[in-house]
């Protein structure tokens, strides 16, 4: 039991210094190393024509449960009285150039997040706010093949967010992450669409970390992750679309401290909830709430989004 509590404490600190970060387009977030998830929904793989666009993501995450490796709620030790809230806003300018490569217009974008995060438990009650880890996307491409639409992008999460190894709650992750994405949208009859984004995260080391097991300086490396966003939409008319949206996250490798793997450190989560989108000329608004389930090694809560897309 003692070893299990030590491991959970280690994961707890790693999670809230590295995982629950919302440092990209999501909390993103969130909530999970440097990869983004859950932010996009209907028609997510449709590429716009050349021009300048702005997507603004506002998100709120709240949880009052922490699940262990077996999926059971942790009610004792450092996790008793656990609660967390995360509020943020990410500005994402997108520029689609006239130039084509591989049959697609060449586009690039970046995500700049502003975050406020609070974590409360038996050990502490801490709050922090500031700029999170900025997302840089030097290239993304899209192709339209009749009812099929495809999108390919390559994101880099930079360690720009506020981070202090002595602080329990951080906004930044203090490491780089590379995240390729492949997305597809299928436009069906009856005004329906099915959407899927597949993502993979490779994380570099955080070279400024304190091992909670012995209080010594260490290197921390988050494991590699696979995750996906999904949605199914129905167009009631040209301006209103409703449906369901969610995400799935799965850690594929263990986290490491000083090159040594941490057993039972992998997490997972599945989320689903209602979504609705309104379109007005150059402006599109979408709202959704995603309820987490099948949770292991992380908080379980609800993630809500307001996404605004404007075409200049």
Image: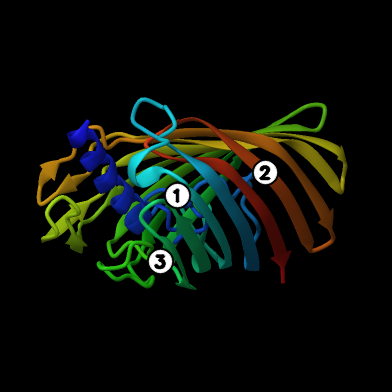
Residue designated by label 3: 133
The circle drawn on residue 289 is 2
* Residue at left offset 34%, top offset 46%: 78
Alpha-carbon span between mark 3 and mark 1: 13 Å
Picture coordinates of residue 211 (x, y %)?
17, 55
User: Label 3 crowding class (10 Å Cα cut-off): few <14, some 14-19, many 20+?
Assistant: many
* One can see residue 263 in this view: no
Picture coordinates of residue 205 (x, y %)?
20, 57
The circle drawn on residue 31 is 1
Element under disc 3? loop
Mark 3 vs 1, N-terminal side: 1
The circle drawn on residue 50 is none
Side of 61 relative to 200 (left or right): right
In the picture, the quarter occupied by the C terminus is bottom right
User: Label 2 crowding class (10 Å Cα cut-off): few <14, some 14-19, many 20+?
Assistant: many
User: From the viewer's perspective, is residue 123 above or below residue 260?
Assistant: below
User: Label 1 crowding class (10 Å Cα cut-off): few <14, some 14-19, many 20+?
Assistant: many
Element under disc 2? strand
Tell me if label 3 and label 1 are in contact, CB under 8 Å.
Answer: no
Residue nearest the viewer, comparing 203 with 282: 203
* Residue at left offset 41%, top offset 27%: 71
Alpha-carbon span between mark 1 and mark 2: 15 Å
């Amino acid at each position: 039991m003692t070893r299990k509590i030590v491991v959970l404490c280690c994961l707890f600190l790693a999670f809230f210094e590295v995982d629950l970060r919302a440092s990209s387009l999501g909390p993103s977030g969130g909530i999970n190393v440097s990869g983004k998830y859950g932010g996009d929904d209907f028609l997510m793989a449709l590429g716009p024509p050349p021009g300048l666009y702005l997507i603004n993501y506002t998100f709120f995450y709240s949880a009052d449960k922490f699940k262990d490796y077996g999926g059971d709620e942790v009610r004792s030790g450092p996790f008793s009285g656990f609660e967390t809230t995360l509020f943020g806003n990410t500005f994402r300018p997108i520029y689609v150039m006239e130039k084509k490569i591989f049959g697609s217009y060449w586009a690039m974008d970046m995500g700049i997040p502003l975050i406020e995060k609070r974590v409360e438990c038996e050990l502490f009650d801490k709050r922090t706010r500031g700029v999170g880890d900025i997302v840089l996307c030097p290239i993304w491409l899209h192709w339209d093949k009749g009812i099929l639409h495809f999108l390919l992008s390559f994101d880099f999460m930079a360690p720009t967010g506020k981070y202090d190894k002595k602080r329990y709650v951080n906004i930044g992750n203090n490491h780089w992450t590379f995240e390729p994405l492949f997305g597809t949208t299928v436009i069906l009859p009856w005004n329906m669409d099915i959407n899927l984004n597949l993502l993979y995260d490779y994380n570099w080391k955080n070279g400024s970390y304190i091992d909670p097991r012995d209080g010594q300086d260490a290197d921390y490396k988050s494991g590699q992750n696979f995750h996906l966003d999904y949605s199914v939409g129905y167009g009631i008319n040209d301006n209103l679309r409703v449906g369901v949206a969610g995400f799935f996250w799965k850690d594929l490798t263990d986290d490491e401290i000083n090159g040594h793997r941490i057993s039972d450190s992998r997490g997972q989560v599945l989320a689903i909830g209602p979504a609705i989108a309104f379109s007005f000329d150059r402006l599109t608004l979408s709202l959704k709430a995603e309820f987490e389930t099948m949770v292991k090694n992380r908080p379980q809560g609800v993630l809500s989004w307001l996404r605004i897309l404007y075409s200049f």
